[in-house]
Image: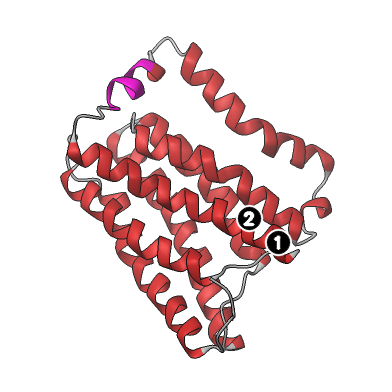
Amino acid sequence: MGEYALYALGFFAQGLFGARLLVQVFLSQREGRSVSPTLFWLLSLLASFLFLIYGVLRSDPVIVLGQTLSYFIYIRNLQLKDAWKGFPMAIRIIAFALPAVVFGWMVMSPGHVWQRIVSQADITNFWIVLGGVGQLMLNFRFVYQWYYSERAGTSALPLGFWVISAVASVMVILYALFRPGGIDPVLLLAQGLGIFVYVRNILFFQRSKPGDGF
């Protein structure tokens, strides 16, 4: 895949991630509180798979690790919202199988995709470590969100989710600027725009009554 086509894929995936945030903040603004709409999770699932492909083709271990961890949490949130069972069985099976197909292709590819990704996972490089930690935090927020939602019995986006998002976003922005392979405009634009939504949701909670959830 050519460089421009690769960037187009990355920007399209990040456009979907951005669209989910716009949907979430618009509905939250209308409700006067932070909400967890079904469309947020549908867009997340599609964007995650496309960005996983982008990460594989870019041989970026930070992206590959991050998207693999969050993909199934998006599915779980759709289950919690009783939206997942509304999809045909064939679609659900394909959705579950897609990450395994991608990883199988990475390992078996004659282009040694897996070896290239592993070779770039240099834990001695400060920016790789910073980006990796930031990406892990961006995905840990969904583990935290999943735990919170399981306890609440419904899909929710608590205050802690947005605080973790804001901190991790700054770390990934720095990684995108100083990564060994050069600036990644896709990560830079996505996190640069996303941080405004994260801060907006934190402000929603500051205006809410105490005990609305961290």
Instruction: State the residue at coordinates (80%, 59%).
Output: 82
Instruction: State the residue at coordinates (58%, 68%).
Output: 157
Q: Is residue 11 left or right of residue 3?
A: right
As drawn, 81 above or below 131: below
Instruction: State which quarter of the image contains the N terminus.
Output: top left
Q: Quadrant of residue 146?
A: bottom right
Say which mark, if any, is on residue 147. Answer: 2
Disc 2 element: helix
**Location of residue 102 in the rendering, given as x and y in whole percent from the top left corner:** 54, 27
As drawn, 87 above or below 192: above
Q: Amino acid at mark 2?
A: Tyr
Magenta portion: prevailing SS class: helix
The reply to whether residue 187 is in sight is: yes
21 vs 144, nearest the viewer: 144
Question: How far is mark 2 from mark 1, CA to CA?
Answer: 6 Å
Instruction: State the residue at coordinates (25%, 50%).
Output: 185
**Location of residue 145 in the rendering, given as x and y in whole percent from the top left corner:** 58, 59
36 vs 208, nearest the viewer: 208
Q: Is residue 138 left or right of residue 172?
A: right
**Location of residue 168 in the rendering, given as x and y in whole percent from the top left corner:** 35, 56
The reply to whether residue 154 is in sight is: no
Say which mark, if any, is on residue 151. Answer: 1
> Which span is picked out in magenta?
115-121
As drawn, 84 above or below 209: above
